[in-house]
Image (spheres, rainbow, N blue to C red):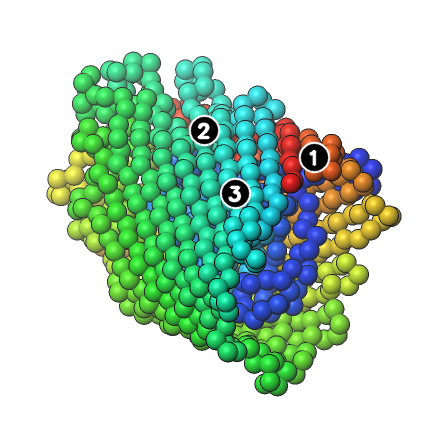
Amino acid sequence: MKRILLAGLATCTSTAAFAQGAPTESGADEIIVTGTRTEGRAALASSAPIDVVSGDAITESGHPDLGRALNFLQPSINFARAATTATAANTKPVTLRGLSPDQTLVLINGKRRHANAVLNVNNSIGRGSAGVDLDTIPENAIARIEILRDGAAAQYGSDAIAGVVNIILKSDRSGGAGELMGSVTEEGDGETALASLSAGFALGPEGHLTVSASARHQRATNRAFVDQRFGRVTYRIGDPKATVASLALDAALPLGAAELYAFGTLTRKVSNNAAGFRIPGFSPIHPGGFLPIIEPKIWDAGATIGLRGEIGPVRADFSQSFGSNKADFRVFDTANVSLGAASPTDFDSGGVTYRQYVSDLTFALPLDGVLAGGNVAVGGQYRHESYKIRNGERDAWFGLGADGFAGFNPRNPTDARRDAYAAFLDVELRPVRPLLLGGAVRYDHYDDFGGKATWRATARLDLAEGAAIRGTIGTGFKAPSLQQQYFSAVQGALSAGQLVTVGTLPVADPVARALGASDLKPERSRNITAGVVFGPIEGFSFTADYFHIRIRDRIALSEQLGGAAVAAILAGAGITNFQQARFFTNAVDTTTRGVEATARWQGELAPGTRLALAAGYGWFESRLDRLRPNPVLPSLPLLSRKSILFLTEAQPRSKFTFQGKLTHGPFDAAVNVAAFGTYTSAPLANAQTFGGKETVDVATGYAILPALRLTAGVQNLFDARPDEIDEQASFIAATGGSFPTGEETPIGLNGRTWYLRLSARF
């Protein structure tokens, strides 16, 4: 920690120029649209904690994907860098407040974003969830991101248990920006090339069309240890090889007293990751052993069109949104041992598709003449969802199936659909100017499990200029996703360090029922947040908040159930292509609590010299309140210690972030520090607590021309690496001691990385 403080002090006092992860200079005074339906409210004037991250801060961080950028800029966000698991490493959701990815609602311009079709069924953070892949949203299309750290299901519906991430797209009428960036790790792999361009165009006297495009290609990194069984590296453990191309549009056209608006994104992503190494003799086709490669090809599209305007004093907004995420899987460099020497080595493993249609209608009325002012809003929402599994080719799933991923072959065809309806009332009122009170109620009805009512109450009292106390209390819920209810696949997985074949079954499957499955229920939550606000006072602001979230009937993917009793049930059903089984369950109740604090200062040190500082801290604690027994096989718990840790202790218990930026004429300088606390997981078999690690990113930039800037930077300056697994020696026979660490590390495995960035504005 000493060298981190010295690096931060040296950077902040130097006259050299850096441009890395700078704090947004307008965060305190930024007008927000998240968590309130009142116009013109600043982030620091809200009743709940809201962070604002500028698009420039994200782009200048030097991280080519959004999840990594937010991970090193925001203390409440965590982005686990999965290194071997195909579903977790190739789809990139984030977590908020130490909860699951699907317990954070993601919005684009205030409209619900669709989730992944790909369900994370691997042993990693977010196991059993289908969150929103932030890698499908190009960084250069983002104006800012508003992060509401508070339960808000009564305002937005399902999934907002931990909070809301609202991504606001650029809405420029002119000008533009371009970027070329390249990076490479100190070990010479992971080469990444990024090119992006955005431009704004005028539509009529006041309308706009903003177009943003981005393309990125990255080579894989590999930090696997030498396989002690064979004296060579056999695994591939690190960031996957990936190619991502994205397009984003944002447009608005005034029509008298109304405005027609539209926005959307389109992304094509191809990435691949390695499964576990199969030893020599496993297949006659690969006498020296083989490493199966799983390659998902993903198309992601989201679009919204709407009309907003005023009807007398009432503001109205009607919109229709569509979202689609489609992933087709291929596995190659592998074999199906059930086919012997006749087995192909390349298989079409099938695919999954998730689609969402959302209709929103909202009316808002300012209460300017009532007491000291306020706002009332009413509205409704209709949502239609569908989830479909496409079977893979027969050779992929026949017998034991293609090694690595046997593909999709549901016992029953999967083409599921459901409808959901909602209505809400949201009121804010100032009885007197210093006091702001708010309340919201919402009722959601799903045709597959029924209805759920939620409520939220907020209060803020301004004690003096620049000082306030605030608090919220409310309930929330998360509906079981179609992916969790209907996913079905067979794949290889580690169990106590041994490679086994596991079948994931829908809860309605008779075999799953025989193993203890039951219909899924929605998660239920109750949250409390209370805090203080100081500022903005002469460029300084400080906030501190305590939160407490209790979740009942939490949805989790069960343990990989095996043993004699399971084998008998599988044999009785005629199942021979997997030895263990799992399904989703509401078996867990948890409580999460924590403290979050942020501080900012910005100002001029001298004419032409400006300094901006930002720091954040979060402490998080999650505990297991209850684990329900398996109602059919009591001797086989639905969740093991390893699975419980993913829900409670596998994310950092604390996190500190610091960003400092100094600008002087054409030069700029910045430092970005992220210090992660300890976390506990069971990467092979036994639980292990991994030590906290700190990373320091620095960069230097110079304006070659007024609109052209060159930046050189280094991420993870001191080459921090996660702790190694303690029990490697016990699993030499199974893995060869190849695994450097678990899938939970927030800093990744790459180590020090260098990059160059050329950016232009026009």
Q: Pick whichever, 201 or 332, lies toward us.
A: 201
Question: What kind of residue is marked 3?
Answer: Ser
Q: Are marks 1 and 3 in contact (CB under 8 Å)?
A: no
Element class at badge 2:
strand
Element class at badge 1:
strand
- Distance from Cα at disc 2 to Cα at disc 3: 24 Å
Residue depicted at x 27% and y 21%: 345
Please determine whether, in this image, residue 478 is positioned above or below residue 181: below
Q: Residues within 10 Å of mark 3 (few under 14, many from 20)?
A: many
- Distance from Cα at disc 1 to Cα at disc 2: 29 Å
Residue 65 is situated, as x and y percent measured from the top left of the image, at 53, 39
Mark toward the start of the polypeptide (1 vs 3)? 3
Residue 643 is situated, as x and y percent measured from the top left of the image, at 40, 47
Q: Which numbered disc, 2 or 3, marks the residue closer to the eye? A: 3
In the picture of the structure, the residue carrying the numbered disc 2 is 241
Q: Is residue 605 visible?
A: yes
Residue 289's disc number: none
Quadrant of the rendering where the C terminus is positioned: top right
Question: What kind of residue is marked 1?
Answer: Arg
Q: Residues within 10 Å of mark 2 (few under 14, many from 20)?
A: many
Q: Pick whichever, 85 or 703, lies toward us.
A: 703
Quadrant of the rendering where the N terminus is positioned: top right
| Left-right relation of 563 to 572 | right
Mark toward the start of the polypeptide (2 vs 3)? 3
Q: For the view shown, which residue lies furthest in the front direction? A: 204
In the picture of the structure, the residue carrying the numbered disc 1 is 709
Question: What kind of residue is marked 2?
Answer: Lys
Q: Are marks 2 and 3 in contact (CB under 8 Å)?
A: no
Q: Is residue 683 visible?
A: no
Residue 212's disc number: 3
